[in-house]
Amino acid sequence: MAGMTPFFITGSNAKIKLNGKTLAFCTELSYSVQVLTQTPKVLGMYEGSSVEPLGYSVSGSFSIIRYVKDISSAVGSKPHGTADNDAGNGVGNWGSTWGSDSGQDFFARNGVGNDGRANEALNPSKLQNGTTFDIQVYQKTANGGKSANTFSSALNDITSALGGGNGTGDTTDLVGVANIRNCRITQSDFNIGKKGVATQRFNFVALYVDEDSFVADFSGQGQQF
């Protein structure tokens, strides 16, 4: 109906941000959670006796629209939110060049949030130094305020703090959708067609996913502790 604010999740005007800076415009994001199972057999029975989980894995991909370096000289000004050094948004620039002047660098140096080293997962000389990163999916809403959902509220607090806010979530208008944790890039594809923009697709694997409908957690004690 006219005048009603849509309440469904959309992907229009999607952005990928790192430390408060816009990396790229995202054209798509998808992920899959797979639980490997096995059905033990019992002697004398045709059917299995139970279905037992063996493992949990997460994989997915996202695509971005590429833009070139030194774009300010081509269009006359630097687009809002792009890198201060105008170095383009290729994965090789997803490093310290994406720092911020509002405190995000401090969080990054102390292990809070992403530190911009995703590019090292594709650099053969730096694979041993690469680190994982999180993908947080959230959507802006027409009305601000603190969400009653625990996951959404926590995500609002994090994004508010990393974005230079007070960390309370009350000043944001973000609704948390999913948090894909401990990701690593495994593949990068580049695609450009006639009269089309250049896009780059990244495949990734991750440890686990939190959603607004459930919150996953580690199943036991391991090296991550």
Image (tube, rainbow, N blue to C red):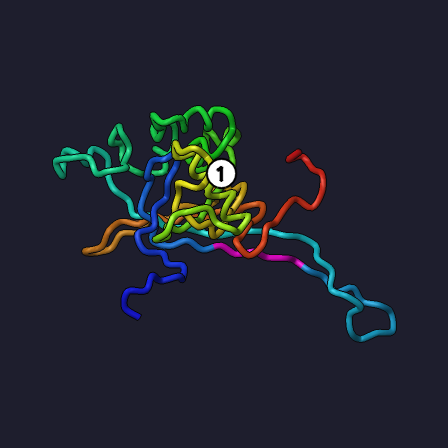
Could you tell me how many numbered marks the image carries? 1
Residue farthest toward the bottom in the current orientation of the protein: 46
Q: Viewer-proximal residue, 146 or 209?
A: 146
Which segment is the magenta one? 31-36
Residue 125: % across, % down: 46, 29
- Is residue 198 toward the left or the right of residue 100 in the image? left
Residue farthest toward the left in the current orientation of the protein: 76
Determine which residue is flagged by label 1.
133
Q: Is 32 within the magenta?
A: yes
Residue 4: % across, % down: 32, 64
The quarter in which the C terminus is drawn is: top right
Could you tell me which residue is drawn at 33 percent across and 61 percent down?
A: 5
| Residue 63 appears in view | yes
Q: Badge 1 local density, few (<14 within 10 Å), some, or many (20+)?
A: some
Could you tell me which residue is drawn at 31 percent across and 70 percent down?
A: 1
Residue farthest toward the right in the current orientation of the protein: 44
Above or below, comparing residue 117 to residue 7 in the picture: above
Residue 219: % across, % down: 69, 46
Q: Viewer-proximal residue, 219 or 8?
A: 8
- Is residue 86 toward the left or the right of residue 159 in the image? left
Q: Residue type at mark 1? A: Phe
Q: Viewer-proximal residue, 89 or 77?
A: 77
Could you tell me which residue is drawn at 22 percent across and 55 percent down?
A: 196
| Residue 123 appears in view | no
